[in-house]
Image (spheres, rainbow, N blue to C red):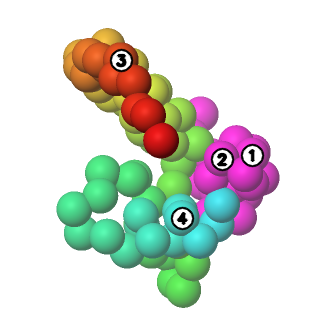
């Protein structure tokens, strides 16, 4: 069953350090964001299941970007003063 959560409840559930209310609010207002929140009266809310799906997608995108990231080769150079 889907449960509606406010941004404050989402932040508390998933950790205020990882998802502060200010970040969730910004993501909610951003037209290009895929964050699943919508306005209900004057509060931003989202279904718990939709937030979990969004978080899984974000983690998946992070895993892909980390695996594809190229590392620059470093050359050793001596510096004399």
Disc 3 and disc 2: Cα gap in Å? 38 Å
Disc number lying in front (3 or 2): 3
- Looking at the rendered structure, the secondary structure element under dot 2 is loop
Dot 4 falls on a residue whose secondary structure is helix
The disc label shown at residue 76, or none: 3
Please state which of the two labelled residues, at mark 1 or mark 3, is closer to the viewer.
Answer: 3
Left or right side of 56 for 65: left
Coordinates of residue 12 in the picture (x, y in percent)? 77, 52
Q: Distance between the residues labelled 1 and 2?
A: 5 Å
Magenta stretch encompasses residue 15: yes
The residue identified by callout 4 is: 23
Categorize mark 3 by other alpha carbons within 10 Å: few (<14), some (14-19), many (20+). few
* Front position in the image: 19 or 79: 79
Count neighbours of disc 1 (C-alpha within 10 A) and say few if under 14, some if 14 to 19, many if 20 or more. few
First in residue order: circle 2 vs circle 4: 2
Q: Is residue 18 above or below residue 9?
A: above
Q: How crowded is mark 2: few (under 14 residues within 10 Å), some or many (20 or more)?
A: few
SS for dot 1: loop
Mark nearer the N terminus (4 vs 3): 4
Residues under numbered marks 3 and 2 in contact, where contact means CB atoms less than 8 Å apart: no
Query: Residues in magenta?
Result: 1-19
- For the point 74% across and 54% down, the residue is 16
Indicate the position of residue 20 as horizontal and vertical percent values.
66, 61
Mark 1–mark 4 distance (CA, rounded to whole Å): 12 Å
User: Residue lying farthest front?
Assistant: 81
Is residue 64 in view?
no
Residues marked 1 and 2 touching at CB (< 8 Å): yes
Q: In which quarter of the image is the N terminus?
A: top right
What label sits on residue 18 in the rendered view?
2
User: Which residue is at 35% across, 17% downward?
Assistant: 76
């Amino acid at each position: 069953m889907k449960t509606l959560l406010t941004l404050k409840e989402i932040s508390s559930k998933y950790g205020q350090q990882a998802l502060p209310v200010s970040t969730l609010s910004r993501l909610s207002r951003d037209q290009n964001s895929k964050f699943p929140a919508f306005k209900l009266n004057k509060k931003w809310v989202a279904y718990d299941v939709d937030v979990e799906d969004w978080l899984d997608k974000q983690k998946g995108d992070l895993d892909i970007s980390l695996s594809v990231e190229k590392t620059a080769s470093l050359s050793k150079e001596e510096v004399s003063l």
